[in-house]
Amino acid sequence: MAKTSSVEKNNRRRKLADQYAAKRTALKAIIMDQSQPMEERFQAQLKLSALPRNSAKIRIRNRCEVTGRPRAYYRKLKLSRIALRDLGNTGQIPGLVKSSW
């Protein structure tokens, strides 16, 4: 099991990213628009950099839903390899056949 503080920090980052997503995309659109005057684009860049760092989607870490493990994460299942193995052994994942010989 991962540290509770790490999991909660990641949850706060998810919440902040959702909260500021629209504002960030609007500012990025202004910054990337070459037809805008340079001064306006620069002001948009300053406003974007003034937003909280944790509001950037890139700072969110993929973690296992069961254990909170940050590594060996399967995106499609939202599980780590260890949790996948444990749940597969008990037959809780539909369609997963674990072979042993």
Image (cartoon, rainbow, N blue to C red):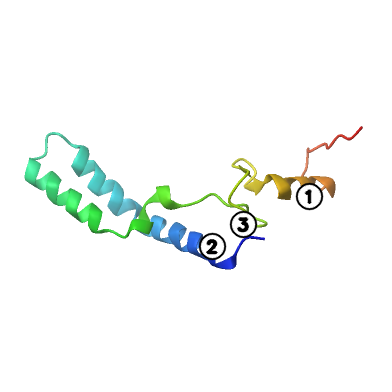
> In the shown orientation, is residue 88 left or right of residue 66?
right
Neighbor class of circle 1 (other Cα within 10 Å; few <14, some 14-19, many 20+) is few
Image quadrant where residue 65 sits: bottom right
Residue at 69% x, 44% y is 81
The residue labelled by disc 2 is: 6
Helix, strand or loop status at disc 2:
helix
Residue type beneath disc 3: Gly
Residue type beneath disc 1: Asp
Helix, strand or loop status at disc 3:
loop
- The outermost residue toward the bottom is 5
Residue type beneath disc 2: Ser
Is 21 rendered above or below residue 4?
above
Q: Are marks 3 and 2 in contact (CB under 8 Å)?
A: yes
Residue at 23% x, 48% y is 27
The dot on residue 68 is 3
Neighbor class of circle 3 (other Cα within 10 Å; few <14, some 14-19, many 20+) is many
Q: Earlier in the sequence, mark 1 or mark 2?
A: 2
- The outermost residue toward the right is 101
Percent position of residue 34, x then y: 15, 34
> In the shown orientation, is residue 42 left or right of residue 17?
left
Is 100 rendered above or below residue 14?
above
Residue at 24% x, 42% y is 29
In three-dimensional space, the C-alpha distance between marks 1 and 3, rounded to whole angstroms, equals: 14 Å
Residue at 59% x, 42% y is 75
Is 84 rendered above or below residue 97?
below
Image quadrant where residue 66 sits: bottom right
Percent position of residue 37, x then y: 7, 40
Q: Quadrant of the C terminus?
A: top right
The residue labelled by disc 1 is: 86
> In the shown orientation, is residue 45 left or right of residue 75?
left
Q: Earlier in the sequence, mark 1 or mark 3?
A: 3
Q: Earlier in the sequence, mark 3 or mark 2?
A: 2
